[in-house]
Structures are given as structure tokens and as C-alpha cells.
């Protein structure tokens, strides 16, 4: 007999050791569980769902890809995990084996995709770049695509541009292409109607929006509804959006700024207008230059998207 669907995703995450965004990714991409949806589109899971997710996590922890174990039933998963445990026990008793002279294959690296993308960018070949990235976006879960492809790609683009090895026009072409892909991904995310809202923005003077879009996607994967209204917004506009949309948090993406004093003023205005209780998350390459200003507004600096997701999920 099937068990009742009564558990919210936070409860499931606590009892399986899986992050909420990973549960949603496995569900949407591989159909590993089928939670009940409330009238407000909120997911509710059963005890059977939790048991299955635990088994899948154990199988993945043993080295199996989720794509290869997602279609196994619970009995098959139990047998798979049991065999893996027996293999580990046997290897422990036998001790380390003699080196065979060859190394086991390493996981597929994202760098070939990044290098192909960079070559398309240097050649100003927008269609080729879109093809490379679109294929990766289809093959990978959203969070993996963002963290393993988009973030290091733009770090590399920034390095090449600062050393004069990449033209500004190439960087702009890459930004336009990736922005389109990230927007499409963001529009396909479905969260509960009662999900907490977070405004994502870049302050005045900060025109690069890839960081903001990746932050919006990370927030969506963590069960929030991101509200993004474009880059380069004055402080009063950002504060207005927070209040108008009844947002529970604000995320600011800071690129390299040419005017640190202006940024300090803008950040102070945002804090005063938005109120002292609003959580403000800040990330991006411009964080280092804004250290003192960020301390004054009690902003939470996130060095990477994983830290951002972890802190967001602590608020829900």
C-alpha cells in the first residue's frame, strides 16, 4: 500500500542528505519520484519517496551515475548497493592491489566543452557557440551546467580579456548568447506559488548580468521564486522592487566597478530603503573592492553558488 504524501521538500532533504535542488533535478530529469502537488503547486513526498531517494543516493555514492540507476526498482537498487558494500569489504580484507600500470578513467571533464566554446568566441561564431552550450545544457542538470560550464567559461573569458588576448566584441557576443540560454532555462523552472520571493539585481554602474542570471537560477533550484529585472538598476528601483513584490531577500551581483565610491553610496541607499531586516546576499568579482561597504549594510557575501544556495535554503 502506498504511503501518504505529507512531507515537504525540506523534510525530505533532511532525511535523505540530498539538497532540495538535487531532489528537484532528479525528479524533473529522471522521474525518480512523483510527489503530490498541492493546489499551490507545492511538492509533498511520501515515506516511500524518501526510502527510494535514500537508495538512489547510496547507489550514486557508490559511483553509479543517476542516469543509469534511475530506472531500477527498489529491489534492484538494494541489490546494487549490497553488492557494492560486499566489494568494498572484500577489497579491505585483501588490501591494496598491485598497480596495473594504467589509471582508471576520470570523470568526463567540462574543459573540452569550455575550450570548444572559447574557440567559437574567438572566431566570433555565435551559432557555433550556441550549439556547443545548448548541447551541454541538454546533457547536464541545470545546476551542473551553470557551475561546471558557465561560471568557469566566464572566468576564463575575463582572464583573456584583461590580458588583451580577447577582444571586447568577443566578450559581448559570448554574453549575449549565454544570457539567452540562461533566460530560457530560468523560464522553464516551476516552483510552488507560495515559494518565497527573492529580487536579483545588479546595482547602478554594474552592467554585466551573467552573474545575476546564474544567481537567479541557483535561487530557483533552491525553491525560491527569483525576480530579475535587468542590470544597472539604481538603488531606489531595487528597493521599490523588493517592497512591491514582497520579496523575502535580495541578491546583488557585483561585477568589476569603475566607481567604488558610487557603489558604496548605492549599497547604503538600498539598505536604508529596504529595511534592516531584509537578508541581502552579495557575490561576484566586485565584492573585494566593496568590502567595507558590504560590512556596513550587513550583507552576506557568497563566494560561490553553493554557498548562496546553502544560505538560501537555511531561510526556508
Image: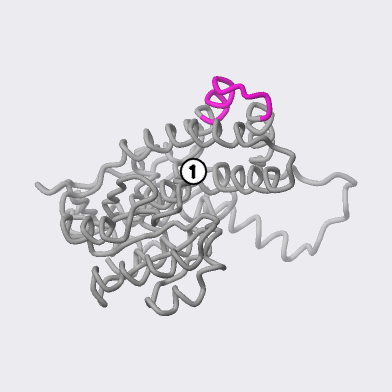
Query: Is residue 21 or residue 199 the one in the foreground?
Result: 199
Residue 191, position as x, y percentages in the image:
24, 47
Query: Is residue 286 or residue 31 the one in the foreground?
Result: 286
Q: How many marks?
A: 1
| 228 relative to 14, above or below | above
Left or right: residue 287 versus residue 55 is: right
Left or right: residue 107 versus residue 278 is: right
Residue 203, position as x, y percentages in the image:
39, 57
| 121 relative to 110, above or below | above
Left or right: residue 159 versus residue 208 is: right
Q: Can residue 136 be found in the magenta stretch?
A: no
Quarter-wise, where is residue 311 in the image? Answer: bottom left
Query: Is residue 115 or residue 286 the one in the foreground?
Result: 286
| Residue position marked by numbered label 1 in the rendering | 66
Residue 38, position as x, y percentages in the image:
13, 49
Residue drawn at x 42%, y 32% is: 180
> Where are the magenta residues, as a range?
122-133
Amino acid at each position: 500500500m502506498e504511503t501518504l504524501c505529507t512531507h515537504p521538500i525540506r523534510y525530505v532533504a533532511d532525511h535523505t542528505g540530498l539538497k532540495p535542488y538535487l531532489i528537484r533535478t532528479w525528479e524533473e530529469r529522471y522521474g525518480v519520484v512523483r510527489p503530490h502537488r498541492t493546489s499551490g503547486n507545492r511538492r509533498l513526498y511520501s515515506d516511500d519517496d524518501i526510502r527510494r531517494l535514500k537508495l538512489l543516493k547510496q547507489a550514486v555514492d557508490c559511483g553509479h551515475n543517476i542516469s543509469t540507476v534511475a530506472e531500477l526498482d527498489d529491489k534492484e537498487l538494494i541489490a546494487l548497493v549490497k553488492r557494492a558494500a560486499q566489494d568494498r569489504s572484500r577489497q579491505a580484507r585483501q588490501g591494496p592491489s598491485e598497480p596495473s600500470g594504467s589509471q582508471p578513467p576520470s570523470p568526463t571533464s567540462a574543459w573540452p566543452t569550455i575550450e570548444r566554446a572559447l574557440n567559437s568566441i574567438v572566431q566570433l561564431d555565435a551559432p557555433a557557440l550556441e550549439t556547443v552550450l545548448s548541447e551541454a545544457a541538454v546533457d547536464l542538470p541545470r545546476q551542473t551546467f551553470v557551475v561546471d560550464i558557465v561560471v568557469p567559461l566566464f572566468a576564463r573569458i575575463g582572464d583573456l580579456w584583461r590580458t588583451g588576448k580577447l577582444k571586447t566584441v568577443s566578450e559581448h557576443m559570448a554574453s549575449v548568447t549565454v544570457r539567452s540560454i540562461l533566460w530560457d532555462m530560468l523560464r522553464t523552472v516551476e516552483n510552488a506559488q507560495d515559494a518565497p520571493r527573492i529580487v536579483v539585481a545588479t546595482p547602478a554602474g554594474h552592467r554585466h548580468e551573467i552573474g545575476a542570471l546564474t544567481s537567479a537560477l541557483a535561487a530557483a533550484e533552491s525553491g525560491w521564486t527569483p525576480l530579475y529585472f535587468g542590470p544597472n538598476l539604481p538603488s531606489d528601483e531595487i528597493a521599490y522592487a523588493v517592497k512591491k513584490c514582497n520579496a523575502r531577500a535580495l541578491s546583488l551581483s557585483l561585477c568589476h566597478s569603475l566607481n567604488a565610491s558610487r557603489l558604496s553610496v548605492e549599497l547604503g541607499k538600498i539598505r536604508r530603503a529596504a529595511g534592516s531586516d531584509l537578508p541581502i546576499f552579495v557575490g561576484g568579482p566586485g565584492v573585494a573592492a566593496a568590502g567595507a561597504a558590504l560590512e556596513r549594510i550587513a550583507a552576506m557575501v557568497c563566494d560561490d553558488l553553493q554557498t548562496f544556495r546553502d544560505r538560501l535554503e537555511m531561510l526556508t
